[in-house]
Image: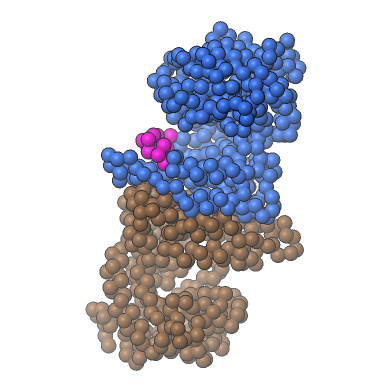
Chain colours: A brown, B blue
Amino acid sequence: MDPRIREHAQVIANHSVDLQPGDNVVIDAHPVAEDLVVALHEVIGDVGANPITTGKRAGKRQHRAFLRAAAQEAGDDDPEFETPEHELALIEHTDVYIAIRAGDNATETSDVDPEVSAAYSQAYRPVQNERLSKRWCLTQFPAPANAQLAEMSRDGYENFVWDAVNKDWDAVREHQQQMVEILDPADEVRIKSGETTDLTMSVAGNHTLNDYGERNLPGGEVFTAPVRDSVEGEVLFDMPLYHQGREITDAHLVFEHGEVVSHSASKNEGLLTEVLETDDGARRLGELGIGMNRDITKFTYNMLFDEKMGDTVHLAVGRAYGSTVGEDNETNDSAVHVDMIVDMSEDSFIEVDDEVVQRDGTFRFEDGFEA
Amino acid sequence: MDPRIREHAQVIANHSVDLQPGDNVVIDAHPVAEDLVVALHEVIGDVGANPITTGKRAGKRQHRAFLRAAAQEAGDDDPEFETPEHELALIEHTDVYIAIRAGDNATETSDVDPEVSAAYSQAYRPVQNERLSKRWCLTQFPAPANAQLAEMSRDGYENFVWDAVNKDWDAVREHQQQMVEILDPADEVRIKSGETTDLTMSVAGNHTLNDYGERNLPGGEVFTAPVRDSVEGEVLFDMPLYHQGREITDAHLVFEHGEVVSHSASKNEGLLTEVLETDDGARRLGELGIGMNRDITKFTYNMLFDEKMGDTVHLAVGRAYGSTVGEDNETNDSAVHVDMIVDMSEDSFIEVDDEVVQRDGTFRFEDGFEA
């Protein structure tokens, strides 16, 4: 076994989920991630915790078969799904939930009706919410189909994933904390890139969180929520944006009083329109995130990595994370949360309360920063 | 997908576990059985039940890693295991449990200390007992490593498994019921084969059950429990006997008053001795079974199939099934239940209350029977 897999397992157990003796652990994974699952079992046996492996999330071929059969049985009606109470009971009695992204075909559910998937997700939400109340971690195993999605060789993608994951996360936390301490007490943020992006927003009263590889592995961002009505200006998302397996190119949004008042895209504009028309919250920002993981050097069509790239900022239309919203501020709620990324590596800056804190990707607390 | 896989899934759902709308279903399987798991998900979606797949039983490589790590951590002490409460909660909220035998290496746990496995099994027993209280089914998928264990080609083994599994089980039940009706009210049974086997036992007051593919798929036997102290005579088990991965050849047992008073084997006699010395119950019979599945034509080192072979009788030393023991009779209890098989195809007969009911494998209710 590649020693980096055992290192990955150690990072998950010791850093991300803080594994303890007696913990009941659920690992959800596709068989292509078997090596990492085995390495995790070594750690779990060593610590004295109790493992079970499920194939729910990753068993896309099974899930496709189930959803299509249910849809066919329902005929012209929408299929109805029940919350799986046995799975809910499993998670309720679980301390640690580890989800491993990996598969043998990234487009396996491409012929499932999105409405059927949505109906199932709705019934499944209690299980998902229960998972998020545990010590949980979402990570990636570099299987060949995932390398294909990233348009990389298998060896190249393995290097990419393990370089991004197997890090000194305490050092990352300390480094990123410098940005948290700038953003957390701030009032106004301005994002400027080229002639196409100039956006201002208030973050006053909201909380800035430091993502250093706990719930997401890799981590590598600091993030907060814009104050709901404060966003003004325009933004062009010049990094690839994938939604429901389709690319939206050159998404451009114009905000007034926090709301998108006009939008365009050079490809799949209709899909962007659909997203924005989901509900009221979908036309407002729920997240401002600043990517700080410089070991993620390449866009791989996988938001777990893409949004943490160094020299990028991402904004999400839709739902805000509750933990980022101050108690005096209104939370932006929505059925969607769609991240979109701006390249900040050239001709760009971030201003916080009228001071430049990042220019062309370099933070003011880093060498080479030019004020 | 081979259409026999979908047929197998239908037999499991409609015959073995009587799948109902709203059932919470656990499927435990190794990834090599994916096709059958997918086919089951089609049926489950069609019926409107709720599936989850686990890899506990079949994830031998993970399990090996876990057990060895726990043993290493314990050092010179025996490792201690906890009952996995989250898995127990899962099964408690489950209606149907389907276990699929299949793997990619039948000897994957060969380097796990048997005492460590036994300690884990002990902690796991509440989960196992809970499973057995559900509508459950144990079946086989013909993966390549299982074909290898059976010393067959993959195609040949696929034919073998699906011929044994995909049957008209109602017809089997009716056919076998004729033997149940002979054995259930009987007092004395005599098993005679060649010069080496001549065994008598009472089954008075005990119950004969008809195994027609419900909990075991394939099924194909009728079975009961000998009255505990009644077994007299000798038996040579002339079909291969595998225990803990090792073959015991020509096992020979002599019984007096129900108890083994002498034993021998031409290979691995020490292992046979170990079995018999496990506890008091291990020296007495817990089961008399009569194999009646004539589509199982070959010994495959897999008791799920072997014990149901046509023209065979099997006896188990150790634990009796509670459901076979009449309320006025004493149950033989033991930590072990080891099945051993006698070939009845030639120079053999079964007598019930002094009447021959099977000669050279042919039952008295079948064509060609010679009284």
Is residue B40 something one can see in this rendering? yes
Image location of residue A307, percent across then percent down: 42, 72
**Residue furthest front as drawn:** B328
The structure residue drawn at horizontal position 46% and vertical position 68%, both measured from the top left corner, is: A303
Residue A300 painted magenta: no
**Residue furthest left as drawn:** A367
Indicate left or right for B172 with B113 as reference: right
Is residue A65 something one can see in this rendering? no
Indicate left or right for B158 with B264 as reference: right
The structure residue drawn at horizontal position 36% and vertical position 83%, both measured from the top left corner, is: A184
The structure residue drawn at horizontal position 42% and vertical position 23%, both measured from the top left corner, is: B277
Q: Nearer the viewer, residue B351 or A244?
A: B351
The image quarter in which residue B118 lies: top left
Image location of residue B264, percent across then percent down: 44, 14
Image location of residue B326, percent across then percent down: 63, 28
- The magenta region covers B107-120
The structure residue drawn at horizontal position 46% and vertical position 24%, both measured from the top left corner, is: B280
Quadrant into which the C terminus of chain A falls? bottom left
Q: Nearer the viewer, residue A123 or A258?
A: A123
